[in-house]
Amino acid sequence: MQELVEQLIALARGMWQRRWIGLAVAWLAAIIGAIVVFRLPDKYEASARVYVDTQSLLQPLMSGMAVMPDAGQQVALLSRILLTRPNLEKIIRKSDLDTAAGKAASELVDEAAGSLAIARAGGDNVYTIAFRYIDGRKARDVVQAALSTFIEQSLGQTRIGTDSARKFLDEQIQDYENRLRDSEARMQAFRLKYMGYLGNSSQTYLGQMGTLTEQMNDARIELRVAEQTRDGIRKQLAEQTKQGPAPSPKRSIAVPEFDTRINELKRQVDEALRKYTDQHPDVVSTKRLIAQLEEERRREIERRLPEADLANPALADPVVQQLKVALNDAEANVVTVRARLAEYETRYNQMRLAAETMPKIDMELVQLNRDYGIQKNQYESLVGRRETANLTGKLEDAGVAEFRVIDPPRVTPRPVAPNRLLLLGAVVLVSLAAGAAVSWLVSQIRPTFHDGRALRDIAQRPLIGMVSVLPTHTLRAMRRRSALLFAGGLSGLFASYGAALALLFLTRGF
């Protein structure tokens, strides 16, 4: 502890020896600081107050029908958004601040951001907008521009949010609509694939099995009758061919390519007449096609008749020709009945296998119906929410908050910045600190020893002896005069500070 005290005393002695350098630096720093403070431009403050009324009559009326936005929270958010760079550039251009300053709006954004402030007054919905600038008129213009921008964005920001929500809902609705179409397509494909298994509203699974059994029995009977008819015609044709052509003035030629198509179309007409009337479009068009084919068949027969008489006299027998036509019809009928019977048997076998596959089909159908139901419910819910969003947008257009300007933009009659009283006091303190720091620095660069022990500790050599200075009357007078001069210089610094304060009071009315 004693060593620390001794070191402090030695440090103070060294700084005292270099006190005149410190005093000169303090005066120089004080003069420069005072010049800077007095040359700072005066700034005037313009301010305005606006009241936001969030208690709208539409809120209790539309409760439950539309989403009621928190107007107070939105306005508080907008008060922070107002100080963003795009909005500040907009305010600068609107107030012509860039024209007055001779700079681009983007270059003035940082300065405007530090001078423009918006704050909420206590717990009330009263907002104060203030701006400081060297020109009071321009400061008022900036506040007016900021006030109008604040109100405009407060009215339009909620609308932007509603449009974004509506756009999102439209995208989701379109997505679920596509999903519903896919689900409906899968269900339709499933029903078509298992149409015979699923049945219909008027016939059960057992009823379909009974119907198919009856249809197969009828088809078998019809097939036996068709085969017997074909065999009988074939036998008659063989006997007639052995007997030779019968005398007949009229000859006929069989044309299989036409006969087969005509017989098939006639069979289709017979099947269609079981379901429809003669006036049905399918029946009418098929009959028209049969008439055209018969006319082409007649022309073909007339063309082939001379050649047939020369090539094979047996073909001229009209009975043989008729039997061949009948045989072709019988063959076509047998083929048709067999195909119908094969179709009935295939369906019957599928229905028999359905007893094992029906649980799987039911599970798959339940899953398809469940997925479809979930997607349909989500789709209907999204459509309802979109209607709510539309109603909310209309409600926001009507206005959920009202803005009233309490105090229009006005400018303070006297400058509010810079605070020269505070700045001058800081200049004095900084100048004293600078003088003390320079004194200490010089004492460290050019140190002096005040006793033998300090010299012996630094030099690490034995000290032979010391020569003391005896304080005479003249030396004491010189030291006293030096101390008085230093005290006068230091007092002059404080007196200068007082004179600067007096000058401020006289010239600026502080």
Image: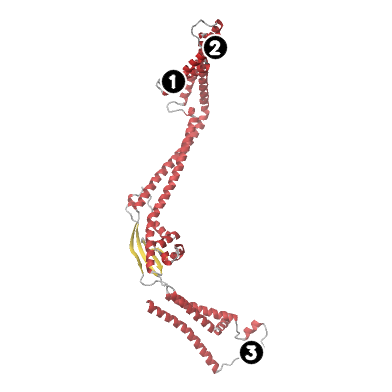
Above/below status of 451 relative to 421: below
Mark 3, secondary structure of its residue: loop
- In the picture, which quadrant includes the N terminus? bottom right
Q: Residues within 10 Å of mark 2 (few under 14, many from 20)?
A: some
Image location (x, y in percent) of residue 96: 40, 63
Q: Residues within 10 Å of mark 1 (few under 14, many from 20)?
A: few
**Are the residues flagged by discs 2 and 3 in contact, CB closer than 8 Å?**
no
Question: Mark 2 or mark 1, which has the lower sequence index?
Answer: 1
Above/below status of 244 relative to 13: above
Can the viewer see residue 477? yes
Above/below status of 225 relative to 379: above
- Amino acid type of disc 1? Arg
Mark 2 lies on residue? 308
CA gap between label 2 and label 3 equals 165 Å
Q: Residue at x 56, y 94 (%)?
A: 472
Mark 3 lies on residue? 466
**Are the residues flagged by discs 3 and 1 in contact, CB closer than 8 Å?**
no
Image location (x, y in percent) of residue 475: 55, 92
Q: Residue at x 37, y 67 (%)?
A: 137
Mark 1 lies on residue? 288
- In the picture, which quadrant includes the C terminus? bottom left
Mark 2 or mark 1: which is in front? 2
- Amino acid type of disc 2? Ala
CA gap between label 2 and label 1 equals 29 Å
Q: Nearer the viewer, residue 226 or 249?
A: 249
CA gap between label 3 and label 1 equals 150 Å
Mark 2 or mark 3: which is in front? 2
Question: Mark 2 or mark 3, which has the lower sequence index?
Answer: 2
* 509 with respect to 260 (left or right): left
